[in-house]
Image (cartoon, helix red, strand yellow):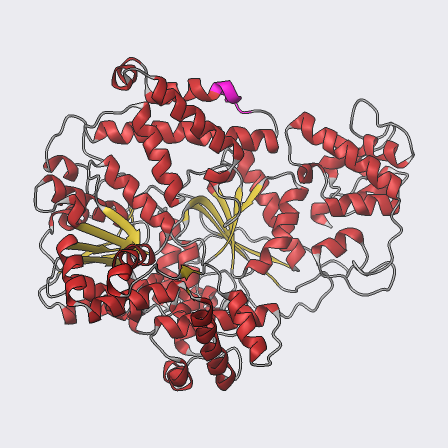
Amino acid sequence: MQVQLPGAQPFPSDGPHQGDTGADAVLAGLDPEQRAVATALDGPVCVLAGAGTGKTRAITHRIAYGVRSGVMQPQRVLAVTFTARAAGEMRGRLRELGAEGVQARTFHSAALRQLQFFWPRVVGGELPRLVERKVQLVAEAAARCRLRLERTELRDLTSEIEWAKVTQTVPEDYPVALRRAGREAPRDPAEVRQVYKVYEELKRDCGVIDFEDVLLLTVGVLEDRADAAEQVRAQYQHFVVDEYQDVSPLQQRLLDLWLGPRSSLCVVGDASQTIYSFTGATPSYLLDFRLKHPDATVVKLVRDYRSTPQVVHLANGLLAQARGQAAAHRLELVSQRGPGPEPVYAEYPDEPAEAEGTAKRIAALMESGVRASEIAVLFRVNGQSAVYEQALADVGIAYQLRGAERFFERPEVREAGMLLRGAARGSSDPMLDGAREALADQVRAVLSTRGFTERPPAGSGAVRERWESLSALVRLAEEFEAARRSAGLTTDLTGYVAELDARAAAQHAPAVEGVTLASLHSAKGLEWDAVYLVGLTEGMVPITYAKTDEQIEEERRLLYVGVTRARAHLSLSWALARSPGGRAGRQPSRFLDGLRPGSPALRAARAGGRGAPPVEGVRRAARSPLKCRVCGRVLTEAVERKLRRCEGCPSELDEALYGRLRDWRAEQAREQGLPAYCVFTDATLVAIAEDAPGSIGGLSKIAGVGRAKLDKYGAAVLSLCAGRSPEAETGLVPGADPGDIPDLWDE
């Protein structure tokens, strides 16, 4: 049943109603709490905003309302957040609302601009070069300390140095600060202290600075030079801080220097989404905001416009078990959407089965009409992605790894940008052109010269990926035009090109097709129609190195963030063993107790007469362990299981057959517009070339060759294995009985 607070709107519009003018037009379509945020122009203001409640919408409308009403001058407003993507999104929304000129930046970006301006005057000379990746310097510092570090140890040590710097801890004080924080060092604290000290010396010797130095040096300049601080305060008179629960002590110190004695500050955050304390972030500044500012206006946003009541109910239930300071201030979300499907809890015998089952369910969901770009698989650590990449590739589903190639760096997007820029320059009267023809139609016409069509090509490979990139630009034009019109602003091709340039600078990319694979941390700030939370076992969620109560609670909040990424479809799954045939000793995450069917708390609730939530359980028969056909070792890795041998064991690869298979696969991929891995992965081709099966039964035993691929490619592959040219038509070899082919999903 849909639940709404009084005065709620199921889906507030994104901007002012067409035809409205002036400051009040910005308020149209806001719910009562969002309107309270937008009209609270006298600081300080604290907005406690739950997931999916429209916090970015509220604060951007507040800025736009302040600008349109004359209370704020756009060039006097600084809005800060924590990622370039979030800052880019904020700038885009402000432009749509007619509040151009407002600075929306990350803490580091804003500080770097100020440091570049003041350094020649305060210190003299050019600012030292900024090192974007400090790991090489940390490695050299470790070597000078005669420490030999593995790659993971080096990464952990680098993170530890970053934590020390954002908490303003100098090398000499590191061991004491470590004990006070209740933090476990990746190595002996004395070793970390020494590496940290040598790292700082190396930077000075090389004349470079790191990202943490940008904040530290800016703080130093503003504290030491009153004239510099006054110049910054004269430039920026109104401050907005998004994701305030993620502020570190160093960032808060910088914010205090920016603000000075004034109170025109609006902060927005949710303590229940504090998931970066390992980097020095703390929700205490958000939770104690009213202690520091007793006269603050406090507004709570709890109307969830993102997720269905079923998803919200699970999210609320997850936090209801939480403990600690953040839990005491949790927000009870109220869904503003209609009902949707119940969350699915799925248990599998092993990790490969979990990945294969997830891929199969994603394929079924896509067949029902959900787009690949609206589906995500989220896991605790990046190392879990490989088995899901393999499983999706095996069923022909394209995917994208979060943090992979940037949208605006793709060749087709760069080419499209050049064409659109040229078209905008070639128009003698862009405003008139825009009046004659819709912006999106103009963009379609330009991109049609490079292959854009209204209907997508078949398949999901390189050709489809190119089309999806161009299609994303068309959709962006439609959204840009609609937003500008609703704000009462004009639209033309020149303005759209400027929007693309601004988004490219901020890496604020539109959505593209492909299932997203991402860690829970990197999923923060994003949302999808369907989310698959995988690997939810003790030791993974919560992670095994979470020891203290506060660390455990942060792991709970991390799962909460994952749950609240889903709009409608939500799946939570776990595997009882790492590999097929392994000991089924794993337990589902403790965070699911009281929520999942079969959990002790839920059984107690049933005994007490309370109903259990409906659930679609998924359980598969355990499979025998797969052993290396050469040395007999039990195989655990996805690639090894494909090959049916250890990667280091001798191979019986038929090089000539492997070459024929690769050439044939490339041709199939070109014809169907598929990525090569959607035909067969490299590991599957190697396995085929090693076995050289002579029958459909033999081919079906190779992992990655399921029934669908046997139907489609079986005859051609067997012809290649026999040394013959593949037949013109693909499919089963003549005479094969489809009923004799095992369904690999049900092994």
Disc tally is 0
Which of these two is toward me, 258 or 99? 258
Q: Is residue 328 left or right of residue 679?
A: left
Q: In this view, does 467 lie to the left or right of 210?
A: right
Which of these two is toward me, 62 or 110? 110
- Tell me where residue 726 appears, x and y as whole percent: 84, 28
Q: Does residue 507 appear in the picture of this structure?
A: yes
Q: In this view, does 695 lie to the left or right of 430?
A: right
Q: Is residue 280 left or right of residue 467?
A: left
At horizontal 37% and vertical 39% (from top left) the residue drawn is: 503
Note whether 26 is above or below 599 in the view shown.
above
Note whether 209 is above or below 443 in the view shown.
below
- Tell me where residue 398 appears, x and y as whole percent: 59, 39
Identify the magenta region.
448-456
Note whether 633 is above or below 561 in the view shown.
below
Q: Does residue 539 appear in the picture of this structure?
A: no
- Tell me where residue 682 appears, x and y as whole percent: 74, 45
At horizontal 81% and vertical 22% (from top left) the residue drawn is: 728
- Tell me where residue 56 appears, x and y as whole percent: 27, 48
Magenta segment main secondary structure: loop
At horizontal 42% and vertical 40% (from top left) the residue drawn is: 509
Q: In which quarter of the image is the N terminus?
A: top left
Residue lying farthest top?
436
Residue lying farthest front?
125
Which of these two is toward me, 272 or 110? 110
Q: Is residue 707 magenta?
A: no
Which of these two is toward me, 315 or 393? 393
